[in-house]
Image (tube, rainbow, N blue to C red):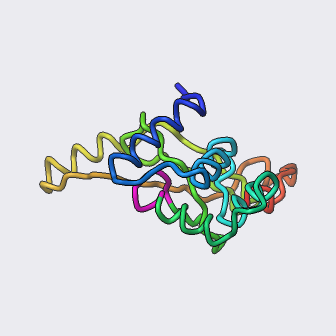
Amino acid sequence: MQMSISAEMERINRHLMANGYKLTTQREIILRVLLENEKDHLSAEGVFMLVKKKYSEIGLATVYRTLELLAELNIVEKMNFGDGVARYDLRGEEQEHMHHHLICEECGSLQEIKEDWLFELEQRLEREYGFKVTDHRLDFTGTYKDCTKGECKRDRKAVS
């Protein structure tokens, strides 16, 4: 079940406070942009462009510093989907691990898989190797059937 933006902001605020940080106005604005565009896996530049539309006083350096802090605190995950651009993905409270992705090599389309398909594998790793998995991330790259038919209309730039 998806949390509302205000509930998610409150959860993140508690996480920041527990780690000795405040939810400053700049952080709140940047987080709101991430929450409102969660499915887009924005780059720092993408976040900055959306922030700049409403709050021109927030600079790119502030966006970068905030995203790096959020990544250090595991509020967001810094990811690269093979296009050389660092993107930021929110970590949901309901997820013990990072969710997985399907990435189309033809068009750059990205789809999230929220279910944890690796739970049984984690148990097996612990049982057979004494290795306790604390986190994982899985990205599948390939081509959607619609793309191989030339019917995919999504532009690769649309996911930036």
Q: In this image, 124 relative to 9: left or right?
A: left
Give how far across and how far down residue 14 sits, in percent: 40, 40
Residue under the point 59% across and 28% down: 4
User: In terms of depth relative to the viewer, which is nearer, 77 or 10?
Assistant: 10
Which residue is located at x 46 percent, y 54 percent?
Answer: 138
Q: Is residue 75 magenta?
A: yes
> Quick check: 2 above or below 100?
above
Residue at horizontal 27 percent and vertical 47 percent from the top: 122
The residue lying furthest to the top in this view is 1
Q: Position of residue 149 (x, y in %)?
A: 83, 52
The question of residue 69 being in magenta is answered with no
Residue 151 appears left or right of 94: right
In percent of width and height, residue 145 lies at: 74, 48
Count of numbered marks: 0
110, 74: nearer the viewer: 74
- Most foreground residue, 116 or 41: 41
Task: Please indicate whether residue 94 sits to the left or right of residue 58 in the image.
Answer: left
Q: Residue 3's x, y, as percent?
A: 54, 29
Up the image or down, 115 lies above or below 48; here it is above
Figure quadrant of the C terminus: bottom right
Up/down of 137 relative to 113, above or below: below
Q: Which residues are magenta?
A: 70-77
